[in-house]
Amino acid sequence: MTDVLIIGAGVSGCSIARELSRRKADILVVEREEDVCCGTSKANSAIVHAGFDAAHGSLMAKLNVEGSRLMPQLARDLDIQFEQIGSLVVLMSEEDRPALNRLYQNGLDNGVEGLRIIERDELRSMEPNISDQAVAALFAPTGGIICPFGLNYALAENAAANAVRFRFNSKVIGVVPIDGGWKVQTENGDLETRVVVNAAGLYSDEIHNMAAEDTMTIVPRRGDYFLLDRSTSGFVKHTVFQLPGKYGKGVLVSPTVHGNIIVGPTAIDQQDKESTATTQAGLDTVREKSGICVKNLPLRQTITSFAGLRAHEPRHEFFIGESRPGFVDCAAIESPGLSSSPAIGKMVAEIVDSILHLPPNPDFIPTRKGILNPQKLSREDMARLIREHPAYGNVICRCETVTEGEILDAIHRVPGAKSLDGVKRRTRAGMGRCQGGFCGPRVMEILARELGIEQSQITKSGGASRLIVGACKDSMKGGSSFEGL
């Protein structure tokens, strides 16, 4: 019997796992997919909200502000990309100024530091591409941008370094109380644990409803995005929001830590928890609204569009707490969930500790080293690295200049990459202008070689997403495939 079983290896589940590993405990993370970061955590706006938007007094507001404050040190400890570039909420009509003032006051009430309202001239000097109709803006200097994959993987790797175990491809199909704890039934067998933590994202309602006496409903809320080429870097320098008002609710335009520009999202409720397909209507909405508060947005430089699903609960609040003895919910974690994740991890760990009274782990390792990026080395250090490890001299992804050495590192970490998407999100191989068109086959070869499996077993993202369905030569045996041509 484990001490704690966490359901879900997204950013919330992995943050909880890392915080719990500060205590001496047997901790297991169970994930339905083939890797960490396969749900909401992999497709979002990649920003750290300052905390001025969430309703004052809500758990969302409390954890957002706390998470934002914790993020800079966490990024240093875990060696991940994070930049506190600040955010702007742009006022497009003087008649909506009372709403801007209310947002400012809400941020002050929430404890957001450094907030101020800036007027037209200062706004234009900060963002030359802001709309000519812009009147003023709320400036939040503590707003930031982060790599959501990097955060999720770093939390998981640091948790694993502190003895947390992970079990993938293990969909939970039942949660049953037993003497001294819970039986968690999965498609790969039953597990027993003293405490269950439900951090199942879009499926947290289903897990909750297996164990709790009340019911919960999670509505998948789709957000469509455009991602622009790195040639657009610098188009905006801050995360730019539009204040909802007479022009409607806009979409954000923001830099990413990798030098792209991200534009979106929509907010479209749907029933299917697996469908992350973009729609023409959704992308048209982003295209229309993105130009309201910025001008000359270079959407023709789009390299990909994508959609993510948020775990929306109609009451629009995080649900964190012990729903039944030994069953702890961390449910309905939608935006600002990424921003709140460090504080969510601490809060849930404290709840679990109050149940189990775990002793501290004297061997806890608080830091983690990220995948080496040779581009950040001096010429001399890079030459030395390539002499010692020739794989770092072999560029696999030309768009993002990702080397074989980086891909090997991504595969052999714990937990490591097992799919094309697993490599892509850890190293950015396949995230550039060609979107993997050139490097994909080579990455498949490396995965197959390092994992000791056939290329036909390599998937895009686990499950049935195999990329090779057969060999051309096999279908041509005997010439029957081309008879009659």
Image (cartoon, grey):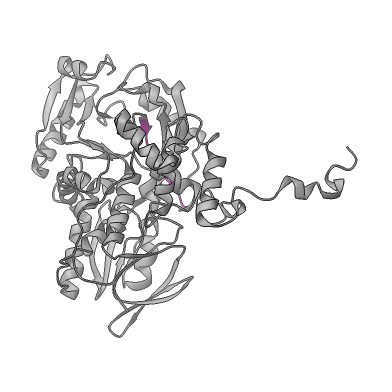
Q: Can residue 86 be seen in this view?
A: yes
Q: Is residue 257 visible?
A: no
In the displayed structure image, the side of residue 36 where residue 360 appears, left or right:
left
Number of labelled discs?
0
**Measuring 25% from the left and 44% from the top, which residue is drawn there?**
79
Point out residue 254 in the picture as x, y percentages from the top left corner.
30, 30
Looking at this view, is 366 or 27 the one in front? 366
Q: Quadrant of the N terminus?
A: bottom left
Splitting the image into 4 quarters, where does residue 426 fall? top left
Splitting the image into 4 quarters, where does residue 230 fall? top left
**Measuring 90% from the left and 40% from the top, which residue is drawn there?**
484
In the displayed structure image, the side of residue 27 where residue 175 appears, left or right:
right
Residue 267 within the segment the image draws in magenta: yes
**Measuring 76% from the left and 46% from the top, which residue is drawn there?**
473
Looking at the image, which residue sits at the far bottom? 179
- The magenta stretch is 262-272
As drawn, 449 above or below 242: below
Looking at this view, is 188 or 198 the one in front? 188
Looking at this view, is 426 or 234 the one in front? 426
In the displayed structure image, the side of residue 13 where residue 484 appears, left or right:
right
Point out residue 92 in the picture as x, y percentages from the top left corner.
25, 22
Point out residue 471 in the picture as x, y percentages from the top left corner.
71, 48
**Measuring 18% from the left and 58% from the top, which residue is drawn there?**
346
As drawn, 205 above or below 382: below
Point out residue 3 in the picture as x, y percentages from the top left corner.
27, 74
Splitting the image into 4 quarters, where does residue 191 fall? bottom left
Residue 316 within the segment the image draws in magenta: no
